[in-house]
Amino acid sequence: RSSFPPPKWRLSESGVCRGSGASSHSLKYFYSSISDPSQGLPQFVGVGYVDGQVFVHYDSHSQRMQPRVSWIEKYVGKEDSQYWDRNTRNFRADEEVFRVGLETLRNRYNQSEGE
């Protein structure tokens, strides 16, 4: 079994991770937003997966992208010192898009309720 991540591994935000070898890996992000969170749930959650394994997590409570596996800190930190800040900004922007989208849906639903 090959070890992941491979040597000279780099994380691409395009959806595919490539190392120096011929193999490729999947990169996926999933987002969830709740219009009326309760019981301490965050309003927005974003989770990043590499090959089906959670590697980063962001939520509206922490407002920081955080590692969920040790290898991401080891490999990304050495090659791209701005990775965490840049992707935290991306998640915050996505959180705002979801917030506005939910607000728009709520307003449209409430306006059409009486018709």
Image (cartoon, grey):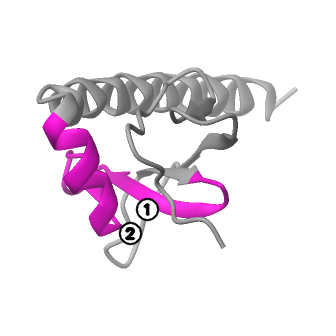
- Residue 94: image quadrant is top left
Q: Tell me the SS state at disc 2.
A: loop
Indicate left or right for 85 with 57 as reference.
Answer: left
Which residue corresponds to the image point at 66% horizontal and 43% vertical from the top-left? 25
- Residue 88: image quadrant is top left
- Residue 73: image quadrant is bottom left
Which residue corresponds to the image point at 49% horizontal and 24% vertical from the top-left? 13
Is the N terminus in the top left, top right, bottom left or bottom right quadrant?
bottom right
Q: Which residue is mark 2?
A: 41
Which residue corresponds to the image point at 63% horizontal and 42% vertical from the top-left? 28
Q: Is residue 72 above or below residue 111?
A: below
**Is the C-beta separation of discs 2 and 1 under 8 Å?**
yes
Q: Percent x, y for residue 62?
A: 19, 55
Q: Is residue 82 magenta?
A: no
Residue with the most extreme bottom position = 39
Q: Is residue 3 above or below residue 61?
A: below
Q: Percent x, y for residue 23?
A: 69, 40
Q: Which mark is residue 106?
A: none
Segment tinted magenta in the rendering: 50-78
Q: Percent x, y for residue 110?
A: 67, 33
Residue sitting nearer the eye, 52 or 109: 52
Q: Which residue is mark 1?
A: 37
Q: Residues within 10 Å of mark 1 (few under 14, many from 20)?
A: few
Q: Residues within 10 Å of mark 2 (few under 14, many from 20)?
A: few
Q: Is residue 74 magenta?
A: yes
Identity, as a three-letter code, of the amino acid under mark 1: Pro
Q: Is residue 84 above or below residue 60?
A: above
Identity, as a three-letter code, of the amino acid under mark 2: Leu
